[in-house]
Image (cartoon, rainbow, N blue to C red):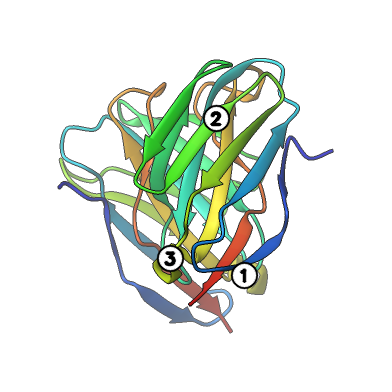
Amino acid sequence: EPEVTQTPSHQVTQMGQEVILRCVPISNHLYFYWYRQILGQKVEFLVSFYNNEISEKSEIFDDQFSVERPDGSNFTLKIRSTKLEDSAMYFCASNRDRQETQYFGPGTRLLVL
Amino acid sequence: EDQVTQSPEALRLQEGESSSLNCSYTVSGLRGLFWYRQDPGKGPEFLFTLYSAGEEKEKERLKATLTKKESFLHITAPKPEDSATYLCAVRDFFSGNTPLVFGKGTRLSVIA
């Protein structure tokens, strides 16, 4: 059964450093998403992406964040200058149509020191 | 004000003891209610999608139902492997067409 995959599973970085989180969505899916979950809190929407552009973003997704689909399979989230409060699990999700179920990856645990 | 409220926050059951988890929502333009299971340190695993009041979906020991204000996830004769956090999420027309809004989840423990 096709799955969303994410790399790395864990990332530790120093405050102020740039990080890139990678995702491979399910192959025939067209809509891609990033969510985050701070430890003990709700899963929160960051951004959605379709046809090589951002379709929606939340207030969390400020100028420090960017997304890209650099090739036909990968979907990345870049945080330019990490802050302590960026420490969280980051989940990628995808679906074929935006009205359908979103399928989530296993997540990347980001720790900013 | 939270759009999605899940109760109880935590539930401890004996193996075989059936129960229900509640998800109440206040969105006015529901475009889907989703149940996910999340194991510690893992991503949400899809269980059910419900679109309209009266709809029901079943999978093994789980059954999800939907009314105009809430959804229930019924667990019949649970086993220890059903222990997880169960997340409810909604998609609301007025919050945009794609973002899911999640509740805080119900942490279920099933004791053998």
Would you name the residue on which mark 1 appears? A39
Determine whether the residue tagged by mark 2 lies in a helix, strand or loop. Answer: strand
Would you name the residue on which mark 3 appears? B79
Determine whether the residue tagged by mark 3 lies in a helix, strand or loop. Answer: loop
Considering only vertical position in the picture, is B68 above or below B79? above
Residue A37 x %, y %: 57, 59
Residue B103 x %, y %: 66, 46
Displayed quadrant of residue A48? top left
Disc 2/disc 3 C-alpha distance (Å): 21 Å
Residue at 55%, 36% (x, y): give it.
Answer: B100
Residue at 65%, 74% (x, y): give it.
Answer: A84
Considering only vertical position in the picture, is A103 above or below A24? above
Res. B72 mark: none
Same subunit, labels 2 and 3: the answer reads yes
State which chain disc 2 sits on: B
Q: Considering depth in this image, is A31 or B18 the residue closer to the camera?
A: B18
Could you tell me how many numbered marks the image carries? 3
Disc 2/disc 1 C-alpha distance (Å): 29 Å
Residue at 17%, 45% (x, y): give it.
Answer: A73
**Quadrant occupied by the C terminus of chain A:** bottom right
Would you name the residue on which mark 2 appears? B65
Displayed quadrant of residue B96? top right
Type of amino acid under label 2? Thr
